[in-house]
Amino acid sequence: MKNFMILVTVPFGQANKVIEAANEAGATGMTIIRARGKDNPAPPKLFGLNMESEQELILIALNQKITAVVCNRIRNEFVTNKINNGSIYILPIQ
């Protein structure tokens, strides 16, 4: 059976929503990494400091049977037509 890694990026502070949705769909273990996005080549400045968007990266390793269920549940939790609301990536792993 194949295994997959779901990578979810969301704005800082939204990881708990992803975790709750994934748990409800049957996922058990996750890793959360604090990150920052580099989507603007010239980020706005405030008091001379660059204001870069903070993100959270959630890593979820799953087997093939449950991957689609968890991914759909996470996607349904977030409004997909909003800009910068988050991204979901699915990668095969061994």
Image: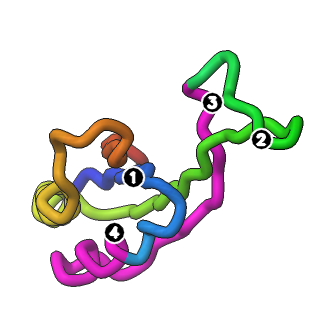
- Secondary element at tag 3: loop
Structural distance between the alpha carbons of marks 3 and 2: 17 Å
Q: Indicate whether 22 appears above or below 65.
A: below
Are circles 1 and 4 on residues that touch, CB within 8 Å?
A: yes
The span picked out in magenta is 17-39
Secondary structure at numbered mark 1: strand
Tell me the quarter of the picture where residue 34 sits: bottom right
Magenta highlight on residue 83: no
State the residue position of label 4. 18
If you read the primary sequence from the N terminus, does the residue marked by circle 3 or circle 4 appear first?
4
Q: Amino acid at mark 4?
A: Val
Question: Pointer 4: residues within 10 angstroms few (<14), some, or many (20+)?
Answer: many
> Is label 3 in contact with label 4 (beta carbons under 8 Å)?
no
Q: Quadrant of the N terminus?
A: bottom left
> Mark 3 or 1 closer to N-term?
1
Of all residues, the one furthest to the right in this rendering is 48
Tell me the residue that label 2 is attached to. 46
